[in-house]
Image (cartoon, helix red, strand yellow):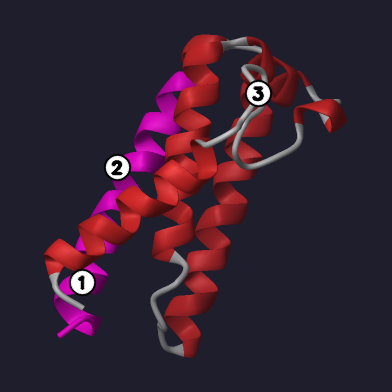
Amino acid sequence: MTLRSLQFAVLLAFLATTAGIERLEAASFDCRQARYPDEIAICNNPGLSELDTEMGALWFSYRSFPFMMGASGARQDEARQFLSDRRQCGANVACLRDIYRDRIDELKDGIQWATKNYAR
């Protein structure tokens, strides 16, 4: 897979996750099921919901790379850590925005690394 085809795949994943999404629907979870302060804040804030959608599309692409067992486990650990960090933010919008931006940067870096190392 070339970098251009990966970028196209990420774009398609992003469009697929945003097509038909209601205004208060986050990409990574169902807002009708939101019960924690972080989830409710994301569902009630269009900017956070957009970041969640972007992060969800990037995660979809990142997890599709066939990493070796150890790296695949680390990838899952990173995802669990993000959710834990998000939960600790509670309803603090600035905190949520910061951890989403950090996670998005991590996923972009991971996709770029995987493209160089696995998609030849």
Q: Horizontally, is 25 left or right of 114 in the view?
A: right
Instruction: Answer left or right for 77 relative to 3.
Output: right
Q: Is residue 40 magenta?
A: no
Residue 109 belongs to the span the image colors magenta: yes
Q: Nearer the viewer, mark 1 or mark 2?
A: 1
Q: Which residue is mark 1?
A: 115
Distance of mark 3 from mark 2, alpha carbons?
A: 26 Å
Which residue position holds label 2?
105
Q: Nearer the viewer, mark 1 or mark 3?
A: 3
Q: Is residue 107 visible?
A: no
Work out whether mark 1 precedes mark 3 in sequence or the reverse, and give the earlier one.
Answer: 3
Q: Nearer the viewer, residue 49 or 113?
A: 49
Majority SS type along the magenta span: helix
Residue at the spot of label 3? 22
Instruction: Report the span colored magenta.
Output: 96-120
Residue drawn at x 33%, y 54% as measured from the top left: 10
Q: Amino acid at mark 1?
A: Thr
SS at mark 3 in the image: loop
Q: Residues within 10 Å of mark 1 (few under 14, many from 20)?
A: many
Kindly indicate the quadrant of the structure image that contains residue 113.
bottom left
How far is the residue under mark 1 from the one under mark 2? 15 Å
